[in-house]
Amino acid sequence: MRAPYGLNILDNCVTCPIRGEHLFCNVSLQAGQRLNEIKSTAVYPKGAMLFIEGQQPRGVFVLCAGKVKLSTTSREGKTIITKVSDAGDVLGLNAVISNRPYEVTAEMMEPGQANFIPRDSLLHYLKDNPEVAMRVAQQLSRNYYTAYEEIRTLGLSVSPSEKFAKLLLTWSSKNAAEDGSAQLKLTLTHEEVAEMIGTTRETVSRLFSEFKKKQLMQLKGATLVIRSRMALEKIVQS
Amino acid sequence: MRAPYGLNILDNCVTCPIRGEHLFCNVSLQAGQRLNEIKSTAVYPKGAMLFIEGQQPRGVFVLCAGKVKLSTTSREGKTIITKVSDAGDVLGLNAVISNRPYEVTAEMMEPGQANFIPRDSLLHYLKDNPEVAMRVAQQLSRNYYTAYEEIRTLGLSVSPSEKFAKLLLTWSSKNAAEDGSAQLKLTLTHEEVAEMIGTTRETVSRLFSEFKKKQLMQLKGATLVIRSRMALEKIVQS
DNA sequence: ATGGTAGAGTGATGCAGATCACACACCGGT
DNA sequence: ACCGGTGTGTGATCTGCATCACTCTACCAT
């Protein structure tokens, strides 16, 4: 199947091409079919906004391919990135369930694909499928935990170094090797990293140098190598 | 009915003596009765811990009377207070639904009363009452929004003054008068205020003086008078 | 009264990190 | 080869707040 942005369209990504533990997976056959009827698939270019902070919730997006940046901006223009989502994540769920405006802006960081489920359809669907409703509740509380971790990080760790180390740890835990090292592609700019840990671009730049010098990490092109998680954990201390 | 700590025991506070919009209110008659069967009521002294960060979730507490302080502490002993709950709030819901450890510590700030619903009973109950399950999902997403606001505050507002002004605003919105002024009892110590906005006791002390001098607030004994919300909002700017 | 303790006010000092101001490196377009 | 734009590295300065170190008050218990 031909698709724009050099992507192949994934056939039925709502029922998780990737992870077994996904929100809409392992539902009954009937429930799965109904889900296919109410979803619609679309492909997005880099920079596309799935939704914007403050908008009324139209529905949820189930991300099939590509990375999505979730961020909030204050009136003065200061921005924090709260999360980088990837395939399998469900975006906009909180807003849809509670019928409040989207609390973040979701922007494609690279070309990707997502399934859209309109708010009304989803709510009816959940009414008819209590099993899935329960899963949604669990997903919401997981979201809450993630937010909570963020609060702990922002509220308890004082120094940028600590927050930076924490960020590296979360990255490395997604690509961990046996020996405590990890390797991953760095897709964010220093500016964006700064927005994730609530500091300035310059400070991030200095943090990179400092951590490299201290042998905590290594950088070959866009490939980030984390030497030992242990050493980072010692910096975090919280 | 006699009770310890000078409290009168409230008869059936799980079905909201106070607020109509409560989680377990307006459920069907049958569902309400079942709820009464699985709950148990207890009275707590000041300083009692309903649950502690890291404990396995035993169940949820529906607060009937008294204020409860929710906090997290880092390994180095730094503490942040994430919320002060009062009557009507449901505590521990996220932990119970997602079956993860309680993420906060819940401590009574004054004598009070709460209904306890054990985890298993609640989960069965929700399975049997999808209407209530949906309400729980909504409650969870509200919790999420609150957490999200906290993230915005911690991440976007830099200075303690801003965060302090923000805190005063949330306080005053609960006791607002028509003209933008508000009056409330200050039950927290400077230390505790510091833990709410992520700064030190000394800084809070100076903030109080500063805000009083700038006519933003007034303090008669434990009664805090907020002159104009407008002026505070100008400080917040986010 | 007298002590003890928890909370509150306030000055002096030091430093981490924001801010400003550059220079440079890289890449894609024409 | 040339440019412009975007991202990065790094020095110099400036400042807000944490930290330390007190004193003072209010309140309770004896």
Image: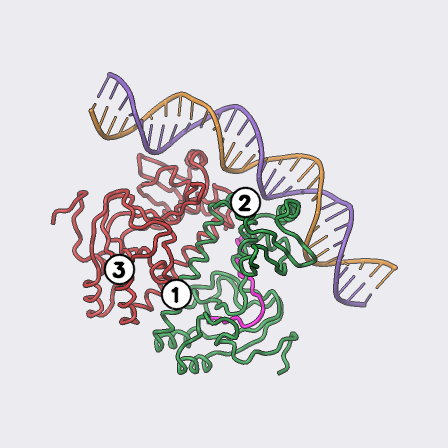
Chain colours: A green, B red, C purple, D orange
* Residue at 23 percent of width and 44 percent of height: B45
Q: Which residue is mark 2?
A: A235
Residue A208 visible in this rendered orientation of the protein: yes
Q: Nearer the viewer, mark 1 or mark 2?
A: 2
Question: How far across and down, in percent of the image, does residue A165 sit?
Answer: 56, 49
The kind of residue tagged 2 is Ile
* Residue at 34 percent of width and 45 percent of height: B182
The subunit carrying tag 3 is: B
Q: Would you identify the image quadrant in which residue C10 lies?
A: top left
The answer to whether residue A73 is left or right of residue B181 is right
As drawn, B28 above or below A73: below
The kind of residue tagged 3 is Pro
Please check the rendered image and state whether residue B99 is part of the magenta-colored stretch, yes or no.
no
Q: Gap between marks 1 and 3, in whole Å?
A: 17 Å
- Label for residue A70? none
- Label for residue A138? 1
The answer to whether residue A191 is left or right of residue B179 is right
Question: How far across and down, in percent of the image, does residue A61 sit?
Answer: 50, 71
Q: Secondary structure at mark 2?
A: helix
Q: Would you identify the image quadrant in which residue A100 lies?
A: bottom left
Question: How far across and down, in percent of the image, does residue A4 sit?
Answer: 64, 77
Q: Gap between marks 3 and 2, in whole Å?
A: 39 Å
The answer to whether residue D3 is left or right of residue B77 is right
Density class for disc 2 (Cα within 10 Å; few <14, some 14-19, many ≥20) is some
The kind of residue tagged 1 is Gln
Q: Which residues are magenta?
A: A59-75
| Image quarter of the N terminus of chain A | bottom right
Mark 2 or mark 1, which is nearer the start of the sequence? 1
**Are the residues tagged 1 and 2 within 8 Å (C-beta)?**
no
Q: Which residue is mark 3?
A: B118
* Residue at 57 percent of width and 48 percent of height: A199
Q: Gap between marks 1 and 2, in whole Å?
A: 32 Å
